[in-house]
Image: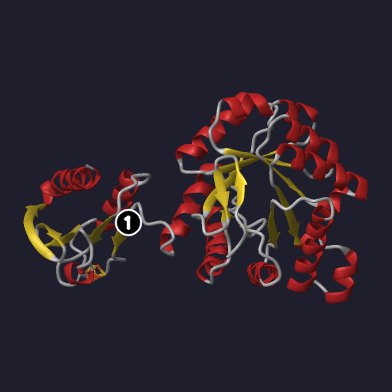
Amino acid sequence: MSKPVAVKNLIIGGGAPVSVQTMTTEKAANVSATVTQILAAERAGADIVRFAVSNAADAEAIPAIKAQTNAALVADIQRDWRLAVMAVEKGIDKVRVNPGNIGAEENIRRVADAVKAHGIPVRVGGNSGSIEKTYLQKYGLSAAALGESVLRDVSRFEKYGVTDIVISVKASSVPLTVQAYQYVAARCDYPLHLGVTEAGTEYRGVIKSSVGIGSLLLSGIGDTIRVSLSADPVKEVVAGHAILQSIGLEKNFVEVVACPTCGRCEWNAIEMARRVEELVSGIKTPLKIAVMGCVVNGIGESADADFGIAGAKGGAALFKQGKIIKTVKREQIEEEFLTMLQMEIQRKTV
Ligand code: SF4
């Protein structure tokens, strides 16, 4: 098991629930826009939100952003150790640095002293574009090069007494990402922040992240996740939770199962499934709802659902745990089903 690391009032690692992160796209110095994005991400279920600190104005904005938000906040520092120190002094909950970019030993020591003095953790983030040259020459572009490079960076912080460390080793290639995390997980017990970097636009990005993050989580590797998408941060958070739900790490949600439909489909089941999913998103109740195309196969196939609906000639059948409880005419489908849905949610939440 990984070592637990505290970030604000959250634990990463040590068997704590896998947390979901995202990153804002606004400039931190634009406090109101950044706060708006963070609050939207929080409503979608983000535990941790990161933003870029690219200059002193961004760092200066930290107290105001913190005062208006609840999520644990992470300052993303690219090159300047001074900004890392400033962000820490301004009250950030965690910093993300790439020590390879921070340069001289002395700079690392200053960042290390700052995080230790404020009792906050640091994420050492390596990626395939920032592998130390010696490792690239020795191992080529590989998990070993990426892993050794980041472990060397970690040791630079350890040397100055920093032990609250979270590691990431991202690549845009899913196999390389997975192998690099496996490499690091086998060699240290720091908690791991999982992600596939530059995953891409929403559709492909979600697929790449689900495969990469999902396969690692299923093998017991990973403590916090970010689905990187060229899309709104809220979409990253929703995708992150969907990954956790799909692999059974998150159970408190309404799962909508729906058949793909086929020639036996008797109604617009696809549209109803889409609407129901929208309706129940964010409801923290363990409930399974089935939206099926026909009674021929639909009811049997979704017998484990708490309740569901299946198309029938001229209407639909409403069922609970595989047993039909009511049949409704086509024009009543929507009203009857949605009423039943509300009742079931209420029944489960009281
Ligand atoms: Fe086809 Fe019915 Fe199966 Fe849906 S439940 S895929 S409509 S057979």
Q: Quadrant of the N terminus?
A: bottom right
The residue drawn where x is 85% and y is 36% is 82
Kind of element beneath mark 1: strand
Give the total number of marks visible in the rendering: 1
Q: Would residue 130 appear left or right of 50 to someone viewing this image? A: right
Question: Badge 1 local density, few (<14 within 10 Å), some, or many (20+)?
Answer: many
> Which quarter of the rendered picture does the C terminus lie within?
top left
State the residue at coordinates (16%, 47%): 340
Residue in view at x 76 percent, y 38 percent:
117
Q: Which residue is mark 1?
A: 255
- Name the quarter showing ligand 1: bottom left
Q: Is residue 80 visible?
A: no
Distance from mark 1 CB to nearest ligand 1 atom below 8 Å: no
Q: Position of residue 17 (x, y in %)?
A: 49, 55
The amino acid type of the residue labelled 1 equals Glu
In front: 73, or 237? 73
The answer to whether 275 appears left or right of 197 in the picture is left
Q: Residue at x 60, y 24 (%)?
A: 32
Q: Residue furthest bottom?
A: 139
What is the image's colouring? secondary structure
User: At which x and y percent is residue 92?
Assistant: 68, 35
Q: Position of residue 151 (x, y in %)?
A: 78, 63
Closest to the observer: 151 or 263? 151
298 over 65 or under it: above or below? below
Q: Is residue 28 above or below residue 126?
A: above
Q: Is residue 147 left or right of residue 138?
A: left
